[in-house]
Image (spheres, rainbow, N blue to C red):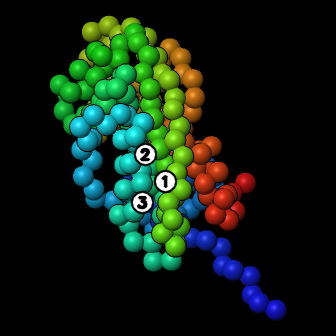
C-alpha cells in the first residue's frame, strides 16, 4: 500500500502583508514568501483587465517553485481604459483622488497559481467602487495619513478610505489585494485543504 501524497505547499510571490493576512483567512500559511521582481510597465494599448492578468502570471512565473505551488496576485485600479499608478508621492495620490472623487471605477484583482509542473491557472475579480464626492479638506486629510503610499489608485480601502466609499459591487478582499473567492477556488483545485 502506497503512502498518501504529502499535502501541497505554497510560496506566496508577494511581500504584501495584506495578501498574507487575506490568505490566512482561508486557513493557508505559505511555506515561503518571495516577492517577484518584474517590470510592471503597462504595454502600449494594454487594457487594465489584460494588464492585471499578465502581471499576476508574470509574478508567479518569476518565482522558482522547487516542487511547491506559487501564488501571485496583482491589483489594478482603472478609470475606463486608464490604469492608475501605484502612488509614490503626494502629488500623484492627490491626482488619483481628485479623479476618483464622486465617480465609479474598477478594481481588477488577478490571482495566478503556478503548479509544481509549471502550469499556470488564473482568475480575475472585477469590483466596481464609487467614492463620494471628495472635498478638498477630505483629500488633504486622507493624504496627511500617508495610507496612499505605494497603493494602486492612491488609496487603501482597508484603512480610512473605506469611509469615503459610497458603495461597492464585487469583492472587498479583491480591492484590498487578494480576491478570496477566486483564490480559494484555485487552491482547492490543486488539493489544498481549504475550508
Numbered circle sitting on residue 60: 3
Q: Say if mark 2 contacts mark 1, CB within 8 Å.
A: yes
Sort mark 3 into few (<14), some (14-19) or many (20+) by Cα contacts within 10 Å: many
Please, what secondary structure does the residue beneath circle 1 have? strand
Q: Earlier in the sequence, mark 3 or mark 1?
A: 3
Indicate the position of residue 22 as horizontal and vertical percent values.
54, 47
Please, what secondary structure does the residue beneath circle 3 have? helix
Cα gap from disc 2 to disc 3, whole angstroms: 11 Å
**Residue beneath disc 2:** 53
Q: Nearer the viewer, residue 35 or 20?
A: 35
At 62% from the left and 58% from the top, the residue drawn is 187
Q: How many marks?
A: 3
Furthest toward the right, the residue is 1
Is residue 111 visible in the rendered image? The answer is yes
Sort mark 1 into few (<14), some (14-19) or many (20+) by Cα contacts within 10 Å: many
Q: As drawn, is 22 to the left or to the right of 82?
A: right
Furthest toward the front, the residue is 45
Q: Nearer the viewer, residue 66 or 173?
A: 66
Cα gap from disc 3 to disc 1, whole angstroms: 6 Å
Please, what secondary structure does the residue beneath circle 2 have? helix
Sort mark 2 into few (<14), some (14-19) or many (20+) by Cα contacts within 10 Å: many
Amino acid at each position: 500500500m502506497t503512502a498518501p501524497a504529502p499535502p501541497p505547499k505554497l510560496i506566496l510571490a508577494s511581500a504584501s502583508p495584506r495578501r498574507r493576512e487575506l490568505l490566512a483567512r482561508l486557513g493557508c500559511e505559505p511555506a515561503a514568501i518571495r516577492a517577484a521582481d518584474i517590470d510592471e510597465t503597462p504595454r502600449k494599448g494594454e487594457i487594465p483587465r489584460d494588464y492585471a492578468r499578465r502581471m499576476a502570471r508574470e509574478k508567479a512565473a518569476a518565482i522558482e517553485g522547487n516542487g511547491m505551488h506559487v501564488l501571485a496576485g496583482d491589483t489594478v485600479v482603472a478609470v475606463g481604459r486608464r490604469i492608475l499608478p501605484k502612488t509614490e508621492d503626494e502629488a500623484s495620490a492627490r491626482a488619483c483622488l481628485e479623479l476618483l472623487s464622486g465617480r465609479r471605477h474598477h478594481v481588477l484583482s488577478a490571482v495566478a497559481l503556478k503548479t509544481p509542473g509549471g502550469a499556470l491557472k488564473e482568475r480575475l475579480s472585477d469590483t466596481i467602487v464609487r467614492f463620494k464626492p471628495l472635498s478638498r479638506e477630505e483629500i488633504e486629510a486622507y493624504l496627511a495619513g500617508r495610507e496612499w503610499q505605494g497603493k494602486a489608485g492612491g488609496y487603501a480601502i482597508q484603512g480610512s478610505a473605506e469611509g469615503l466609499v459610497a458603495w461597492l459591487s464585487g469583492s472587498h478582499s479583491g480591492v484590498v489585494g487578494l480576491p478570496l473567492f477566486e483564490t480559494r477556488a484555485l487552491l482547492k483545485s490543486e488539493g489544498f485543504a481549504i475550508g
